[in-house]
Image: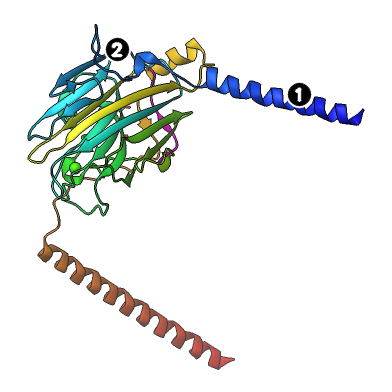
Amino acid sequence: MTQINTNWILAFFGALVALELVKSSQSNEYMKREHSLVRPFQGVGVILPHWDFLGSTMVTSNYIRLTPDLQSKSGALWNYSPVMGRNWEVHVGFKVHGKGNELFGDGFAIWYTKDRMQTGPVFGSKDYFSGLAIILDTYSNHNGPHNHQHPYLSAMVNNGTWSYDHDRDGTHTQLAGCEVRFRNVDYETFISIRYENDVLSVSTDLENRNEWKNCFVVNNVELPTGYYFGLSATTGDLSDNHDIHSFKFFDIDTTITHEEIMRRTNIIPNAKTFEPPREHKDDPKPGMSNAKIFFILLFVVLVTAGVAIFAISYFKDRNARKRFY
Ligand SMILES: *[C@@H]1O[C@H](CO)[C@@H](O)[C@H](O)[C@H]1NC(C)=O
Ligand SMILES: [Ca+2]
Protein backbone atom coordinates (compact mmCIF):
# COMPACT_ATOMS: atom_id res chain seq x y z
CA MET A 1 0.00 0.00 0.00
CA THR A 2 2.68 2.54 1.02
CA GLN A 3 4.74 1.40 -2.00
CA ILE A 4 1.94 2.37 -4.37
CA ASN A 5 1.54 5.73 -2.69
CA THR A 6 5.19 6.73 -3.14
CA ASN A 7 5.04 5.64 -6.77
CA TRP A 8 2.00 7.79 -7.34
CA ILE A 9 3.68 10.75 -5.68
CA LEU A 10 6.82 10.30 -7.77
CA ALA A 11 4.79 10.03 -10.95
CA PHE A 12 2.86 13.16 -10.03
CA PHE A 13 6.02 15.24 -9.47
CA GLY A 14 7.60 13.76 -12.58
CA ALA A 15 4.62 14.94 -14.61
CA LEU A 16 4.84 18.40 -13.06
CA VAL A 17 8.53 18.72 -13.95
CA ALA A 18 7.86 17.53 -17.51
CA LEU A 19 5.04 20.05 -17.87
CA GLU A 20 7.31 22.85 -16.63
CA LEU A 21 9.99 21.91 -19.15
CA VAL A 22 7.52 21.85 -22.03
CA LYS A 23 6.16 25.22 -20.96
CA SER A 24 9.55 26.90 -20.70
CA SER A 25 10.65 25.61 -24.09
CA GLN A 26 7.38 26.49 -25.80
CA SER A 27 6.01 29.75 -24.51
CA ASN A 28 8.48 31.53 -22.22
CA GLU A 29 11.30 31.57 -24.66
CA TYR A 30 11.01 31.27 -28.38
CA MET A 31 12.74 32.51 -31.44
CA LYS A 32 11.00 35.11 -33.55
CA ARG A 33 11.70 34.73 -37.24
CA GLU A 34 10.95 38.36 -38.06
CA HIS A 35 13.98 39.48 -36.01
CA SER A 36 16.25 36.55 -36.82
CA LEU A 37 18.68 35.47 -39.49
CA VAL A 38 19.15 31.78 -40.07
CA ARG A 39 20.94 29.84 -42.76
CA PRO A 40 20.73 29.42 -45.68
CA PHE A 41 20.70 33.16 -46.38
CA GLN A 42 20.54 32.93 -50.11
CA GLY A 43 18.26 30.50 -51.85
CA VAL A 44 15.48 30.73 -54.34
CA GLY A 45 13.31 33.81 -54.03
CA VAL A 46 13.91 36.61 -51.53
CA ILE A 47 17.39 37.23 -50.19
CA LEU A 48 17.17 37.83 -46.42
CA PRO A 49 13.51 38.28 -45.58
CA HIS A 50 13.04 40.89 -42.80
CA TRP A 51 16.48 42.47 -43.30
CA ASP A 52 18.00 45.21 -45.46
CA PHE A 53 21.67 45.68 -46.12
CA LEU A 54 23.94 48.40 -47.42
CA GLY A 55 27.54 49.33 -48.26
CA SER A 56 30.06 46.56 -48.72
CA THR A 57 27.72 43.88 -47.29
CA MET A 58 27.73 40.68 -49.29
CA VAL A 59 25.32 37.79 -48.75
CA THR A 60 26.35 34.20 -49.35
CA SER A 61 24.35 31.12 -48.40
CA ASN A 62 26.44 30.47 -45.26
CA TYR A 63 27.36 33.91 -43.97
CA ILE A 64 26.82 37.62 -44.44
CA ARG A 65 30.06 39.52 -44.89
CA LEU A 66 29.74 43.11 -43.60
CA THR A 67 33.21 44.02 -44.81
CA PRO A 68 35.84 42.09 -46.75
CA ASP A 69 39.49 42.11 -45.61
CA LEU A 70 40.19 45.27 -47.62
CA GLN A 71 40.85 48.89 -46.65
CA SER A 72 38.15 51.55 -46.24
CA LYS A 73 35.03 49.37 -46.41
CA SER A 74 31.80 49.78 -44.49
CA GLY A 75 28.73 47.62 -44.41
CA ALA A 76 25.56 47.14 -42.43
CA LEU A 77 22.56 44.90 -42.02
CA TRP A 78 19.27 46.14 -40.52
CA ASN A 79 16.16 44.34 -39.40
CA TYR A 80 13.03 46.09 -40.65
CA SER A 81 10.57 45.07 -37.97
CA PRO A 82 10.53 47.19 -34.79
CA VAL A 83 10.94 45.05 -31.66
CA MET A 84 7.65 44.94 -29.76
CA GLY A 85 8.93 42.95 -26.82
CA ARG A 86 9.83 44.03 -23.30
CA ASN A 87 12.37 41.32 -22.46
CA TRP A 88 14.53 39.56 -24.98
CA GLU A 89 17.74 37.75 -25.68
CA VAL A 90 19.77 37.84 -28.85
CA HIS A 91 22.46 35.35 -29.93
CA VAL A 92 24.80 36.42 -32.70
CA GLY A 93 27.14 33.94 -34.40
CA PHE A 94 30.08 35.64 -36.09
CA LYS A 95 33.59 35.23 -37.41
CA VAL A 96 36.18 37.99 -37.64
CA HIS A 97 39.24 36.97 -39.57
CA GLY A 98 41.90 38.29 -41.89
CA LYS A 99 45.46 38.18 -43.12
CA GLY A 100 46.78 40.58 -40.47
CA ASN A 101 48.38 39.02 -37.43
CA GLU A 102 49.49 42.18 -35.66
CA LEU A 103 47.49 44.81 -37.47
CA PHE A 104 43.78 44.49 -38.12
CA GLY A 105 40.60 46.48 -37.66
CA ASP A 106 38.33 48.11 -36.96
CA GLY A 107 35.62 45.83 -35.54
CA PHE A 108 31.84 45.70 -35.60
CA ALA A 109 28.81 46.77 -33.63
CA ILE A 110 25.42 45.30 -32.79
CA TRP A 111 22.73 47.95 -32.56
CA TYR A 112 19.31 48.36 -31.00
CA THR A 113 18.42 51.86 -32.14
CA LYS A 114 15.70 54.26 -33.15
CA ASP A 115 17.14 54.93 -36.61
CA ARG A 116 18.09 52.27 -39.09
CA MET A 117 20.12 52.21 -42.34
CA GLN A 118 22.10 55.33 -41.39
CA THR A 119 25.77 55.31 -42.28
CA GLY A 120 28.34 57.11 -40.17
CA PRO A 121 31.64 57.01 -38.29
CA VAL A 122 30.79 54.53 -35.50
CA PHE A 123 31.75 51.17 -36.99
CA GLY A 124 29.94 52.16 -40.16
CA SER A 125 26.85 53.62 -38.46
CA LYS A 126 25.51 56.93 -37.26
CA ASP A 127 27.02 58.74 -34.26
CA TYR A 128 24.75 60.53 -31.73
CA PHE A 129 22.47 57.51 -32.00
CA SER A 130 19.53 56.82 -29.78
CA GLY A 131 19.56 53.37 -28.20
CA LEU A 132 22.05 50.64 -27.40
CA ALA A 133 25.35 49.78 -29.06
CA ILE A 134 27.32 46.64 -28.29
CA ILE A 135 30.76 47.24 -29.73
CA LEU A 136 33.36 44.61 -30.58
CA ASP A 137 36.38 46.82 -31.14
CA THR A 138 39.38 45.01 -32.59
CA TYR A 139 41.67 48.00 -33.10
CA SER A 140 43.13 49.88 -30.14
CA ASN A 141 43.30 53.54 -31.06
CA HIS A 142 45.25 53.82 -27.83
CA ASN A 143 45.25 57.54 -27.46
CA GLY A 144 44.38 57.52 -23.82
CA PRO A 145 44.71 56.14 -20.34
CA HIS A 146 42.49 53.07 -20.76
CA ASN A 147 44.44 49.96 -19.86
CA HIS A 148 42.58 47.12 -21.50
CA GLN A 149 43.70 44.91 -24.35
CA HIS A 150 41.93 44.55 -27.67
CA PRO A 151 39.68 43.12 -29.00
CA TYR A 152 37.43 44.77 -26.46
CA LEU A 153 33.68 44.34 -26.02
CA SER A 154 31.70 47.24 -24.56
CA ALA A 155 28.20 48.63 -24.29
CA MET A 156 27.02 52.20 -24.77
CA VAL A 157 23.54 53.62 -24.19
CA ASN A 158 22.82 56.93 -25.82
CA ASN A 159 19.85 59.30 -25.96
CA GLY A 160 21.21 61.07 -29.03
CA THR A 161 23.38 63.48 -27.01
CA TRP A 162 26.72 61.71 -26.87
CA SER A 163 29.34 61.02 -29.45
CA TYR A 164 31.32 57.77 -29.54
CA ASP A 165 34.95 58.83 -29.27
CA HIS A 166 37.18 56.52 -31.31
CA ASP A 167 40.35 58.15 -30.02
CA ARG A 168 39.53 56.82 -26.60
CA ASP A 169 38.02 53.59 -27.93
CA GLY A 170 34.70 54.69 -26.48
CA THR A 171 35.90 54.18 -22.92
CA HIS A 172 34.59 57.51 -21.70
CA THR A 173 31.00 56.71 -22.64
CA GLN A 174 30.83 52.99 -21.95
CA LEU A 175 28.55 51.26 -19.44
CA ALA A 176 30.87 48.31 -18.99
CA GLY A 177 33.22 46.14 -21.01
CA CYS A 178 35.53 43.16 -21.09
CA GLU A 179 38.49 41.91 -23.05
CA VAL A 180 37.68 39.26 -25.62
CA ARG A 181 39.61 37.12 -28.09
CA PHE A 182 37.65 36.08 -31.15
CA ARG A 183 39.85 36.72 -34.18
CA ASN A 184 41.17 34.10 -36.59
CA VAL A 185 39.73 30.96 -35.03
CA ASP A 186 38.46 27.97 -37.04
CA TYR A 187 35.06 27.76 -35.39
CA GLU A 188 32.10 30.14 -35.12
CA THR A 189 32.13 32.55 -32.14
CA PHE A 190 29.03 33.81 -30.32
CA ILE A 191 27.78 36.71 -28.25
CA SER A 192 24.62 36.76 -26.18
CA ILE A 193 22.84 39.99 -25.26
CA ARG A 194 20.06 39.61 -22.71
CA TYR A 195 17.77 42.49 -21.75
CA GLU A 196 15.38 41.55 -18.99
CA ASN A 197 13.59 43.85 -16.54
CA ASP A 198 16.10 46.65 -17.18
CA VAL A 199 19.11 44.42 -16.61
CA LEU A 200 21.54 44.15 -19.51
CA SER A 201 23.74 41.03 -19.49
CA VAL A 202 26.32 40.29 -22.12
CA SER A 203 28.18 37.01 -22.40
CA THR A 204 30.28 35.25 -25.00
CA ASP A 205 31.15 31.80 -26.26
CA LEU A 206 34.51 32.27 -27.97
CA GLU A 207 36.21 28.98 -27.20
CA ASN A 208 33.93 26.54 -28.99
CA ARG A 209 32.76 25.17 -25.64
CA ASN A 210 29.04 25.63 -26.17
CA GLU A 211 28.69 27.56 -22.90
CA TRP A 212 28.31 31.22 -22.06
CA LYS A 213 30.98 33.15 -20.22
CA ASN A 214 29.86 36.35 -18.51
CA CYS A 215 31.31 39.61 -19.83
CA PHE A 216 29.23 42.07 -17.78
CA VAL A 217 25.85 42.68 -16.14
CA VAL A 218 24.52 46.24 -15.79
CA ASN A 219 21.39 47.18 -13.84
CA ASN A 220 18.99 50.07 -14.48
CA VAL A 221 19.24 50.19 -18.24
CA GLU A 222 16.11 51.66 -19.79
CA LEU A 223 15.46 50.89 -23.43
CA PRO A 224 12.22 51.55 -25.25
CA THR A 225 10.25 49.07 -27.32
CA GLY A 226 9.90 49.74 -31.03
CA TYR A 227 13.59 50.14 -31.91
CA TYR A 228 15.48 48.21 -34.59
CA PHE A 229 18.29 45.69 -34.56
CA GLY A 230 21.25 46.23 -36.81
CA LEU A 231 24.82 45.13 -37.35
CA SER A 232 27.58 47.16 -38.93
CA ALA A 233 31.32 46.99 -39.46
CA THR A 234 34.06 49.10 -40.90
CA THR A 235 37.68 48.91 -42.00
CA GLY A 236 40.16 51.78 -42.39
CA ASP A 237 43.88 51.53 -43.03
CA LEU A 238 43.59 48.16 -41.33
CA SER A 239 41.05 45.53 -42.24
CA ASP A 240 39.36 42.22 -41.49
CA ASN A 241 36.50 40.11 -42.82
CA HIS A 242 33.55 40.78 -40.51
CA ASP A 243 31.15 37.89 -41.05
CA ILE A 244 27.76 37.27 -39.45
CA HIS A 245 26.72 33.62 -39.33
CA SER A 246 23.45 33.88 -37.41
CA PHE A 247 21.24 36.29 -35.50
CA LYS A 248 18.61 34.75 -33.24
CA PHE A 249 16.08 36.79 -31.35
CA PHE A 250 14.20 35.20 -28.42
CA ASP A 251 11.20 36.81 -26.83
CA ILE A 252 11.61 35.89 -23.16
CA ASP A 253 8.41 37.38 -21.82
CA THR A 254 5.30 36.68 -23.82
CA THR A 255 2.95 37.52 -20.93
CA ILE A 256 3.46 41.29 -21.19
CA THR A 257 0.39 43.31 -22.14
CA HIS A 258 -0.02 45.28 -25.33
CA GLU A 259 -0.58 48.46 -23.25
CA GLU A 260 2.76 48.04 -21.47
CA ILE A 261 4.56 47.49 -24.78
CA MET A 262 2.96 50.64 -26.23
CA ARG A 263 3.75 52.64 -23.08
CA ARG A 264 7.39 51.62 -23.33
CA THR A 265 7.75 53.05 -26.84
CA ASN A 266 8.01 56.47 -25.14
CA ILE A 267 11.03 55.66 -22.96
CA ILE A 268 14.17 57.68 -23.62
CA PRO A 269 17.23 55.42 -23.53
CA ASN A 270 18.93 55.84 -20.20
CA ALA A 271 21.45 54.00 -18.04
CA LYS A 272 21.68 55.04 -14.41
CA THR A 273 25.01 53.40 -13.71
CA PHE A 274 26.50 55.07 -16.77
CA GLU A 275 29.91 56.55 -15.99
CA PRO A 276 29.53 60.30 -16.54
CA PRO A 277 31.22 61.22 -19.79
CA ARG A 278 34.65 62.64 -19.32
CA GLU A 279 35.81 65.58 -21.32
CA HIS A 280 38.05 64.67 -24.21
CA LYS A 281 41.37 66.14 -23.04
CA ASP A 282 44.65 65.94 -24.88
CA ASP A 283 47.27 63.88 -23.12
CA PRO A 284 49.01 66.09 -20.53
CA LYS A 285 52.42 67.43 -21.53
CA PRO A 286 55.33 66.30 -19.33
CA GLY A 287 56.29 69.91 -18.36
CA MET A 288 52.75 70.53 -17.14
CA SER A 289 52.64 67.51 -14.87
CA ASN A 290 56.06 68.38 -13.38
CA ALA A 291 54.73 71.81 -12.45
CA LYS A 292 51.63 70.12 -11.01
CA ILE A 293 53.78 67.78 -8.88
CA PHE A 294 55.80 70.76 -7.63
CA PHE A 295 52.67 72.63 -6.50
CA ILE A 296 51.20 69.52 -4.89
CA LEU A 297 54.45 68.99 -2.95
CA LEU A 298 54.57 72.67 -1.98
CA PHE A 299 50.98 72.43 -0.76
CA VAL A 300 51.73 69.28 1.27
CA VAL A 301 54.81 70.95 2.84
CA LEU A 302 52.82 74.06 3.73
CA VAL A 303 49.95 72.07 5.25
CA THR A 304 52.36 69.88 7.22
CA ALA A 305 54.19 72.95 8.50
CA GLY A 306 50.89 74.56 9.46
CA VAL A 307 49.71 71.48 11.33
CA ALA A 308 53.07 71.17 13.10
CA ILE A 309 53.03 74.81 14.22
CA PHE A 310 49.47 74.46 15.46
CA ALA A 311 50.27 71.20 17.28
CA ILE A 312 53.35 72.62 18.94
CA SER A 313 51.55 75.71 20.21
CA TYR A 314 48.52 73.60 21.29
CA PHE A 315 50.61 71.17 23.34
CA LYS A 316 52.70 74.01 24.73
CA ASP A 317 49.46 75.60 25.87
CA ARG A 318 48.18 72.36 27.44
CA ASN A 319 51.48 71.74 29.14
CA ALA A 320 51.50 75.29 30.42
CA ARG A 321 47.99 74.83 31.81
CA LYS A 322 48.85 71.45 33.29
CA ARG A 323 51.59 72.95 35.27
CA PHE A 324 49.14 75.19 37.11
CA TYR A 325 47.31 72.17 38.58
C1 LIG B 1 20.28 62.80 -22.38
O1 LIG B 1 21.23 62.49 -21.39
C2 LIG B 1 21.84 63.60 -20.79
C3 LIG B 1 22.89 63.12 -19.82
O2 LIG B 1 22.67 61.90 -19.26
C4 LIG B 1 20.80 64.46 -20.09
O3 LIG B 1 21.41 65.60 -19.55
C5 LIG B 1 19.74 64.86 -21.10
O4 LIG B 1 18.71 65.55 -20.43
C6 LIG B 1 19.17 63.63 -21.78
N1 LIG B 1 18.23 64.04 -22.80
C7 LIG B 1 16.99 63.61 -22.82
C8 LIG B 1 16.16 64.07 -23.96
O5 LIG B 1 16.55 62.85 -21.97
CA1 LIG C 1 39.05 51.23 -31.61
Q: Nearer the viewer, residue 224 or 125?
A: 125
The amino acid type of the residue labelled 2 equals His
> Label 1 CB, ligand 1: below 8 Å?
no
Label 2, secondary structure: give it.
loop
Instruction: Point out which mark residue 12 bears.
Output: 1
Label 1, secondary structure: give it.
helix
Q: Is residue 315 left or right of residue 140?
A: right
* The N terminus, quarter of image: top right
In the rendered structure, which segment of residues is drawn in magenta?
A: 216-226
> Exactly how many numbered labels are in the figure?
2
**In the rendering, at what x and y percent does residue 282 appear?**
13, 51
The amino acid type of the residue labelled 1 equals Phe
Note whether 32 is above or below 72 in the view shown.
above
**Location of residue 12 by image quarter:** top right
- Which residue is denoted by mark 2 in the rendering? 50
- Residue 44 within the segment the image draws in magenta: no
